[in-house]
Amino acid sequence: MGTQEFHIVGMISHLGPQMGVADGVALGNLLKKNPHVTAVFTGDGASSEGDFHESINVAAVWDLPVIFVIENNGYTVSVRPVRTVSLQTIY
């Protein structure tokens, strides 16, 4: 699902783990002084995982060139968010 020609790293999970991979790609580009920005996409279900919070924190602390796109699709893997989080909305 990935391609080196277009700089796309294949998704390793539909939740939080790919966010850490995005941090690594962004860090690699930063260290090589490549002027690239890394984008990573995930759903609202990832916000219940430690990888989600750790990846966003590392990106902020290390000032990594990464964009996190979180889609609130109304499902956290297979159930409605009301069954997995105490918030009414995830923004």
Image (spheres, rainbow, N blue to C red):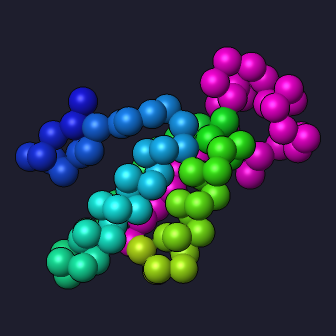
Choose between 33 and 54: the one closer to the eye: 54
The residue positioned 64% from the left and 51% from the top of the image is 50
Which range is magenta? 65-91
In the rendered image, residue 90, in percent from the top left (x then y), is placed at 77, 46
Vertical arrangement, residue 58 with respect to residue 68, above or below: below
What predominant SS class does the magenta segment belong to? loop
Q: Residue 13 colored magenta?
A: no
In this view, the residue farthest toward the top is: 78
Left or right placement of residue 58 versus residue 3 in this view: right
**Would residue 7 be visible to someone looking at this image?**
yes
Res. 15 image quadrant: top right
Left or right placement of residue 67 versus residue 79 in this view: left
Of the 4 image quadrants, the one containing the N terminus is top left
Count the labels in the image. 0
In the rendered image, residue 53, in percent from the top left (x then y), is placed at 64, 58
The residue positioned 53% from the left and 60% from the top of the image is 55
In the rendered image, residue 20, in percent from the top left (x then y), is placed at 45, 55
**Would residue 35 be visible to someone looking at this image?**
no
The residue positioned 59% from the left and 61% from the top of the image is 54
In the rendered image, residue 40, in percent from the top left (x then y), is placed at 43, 50
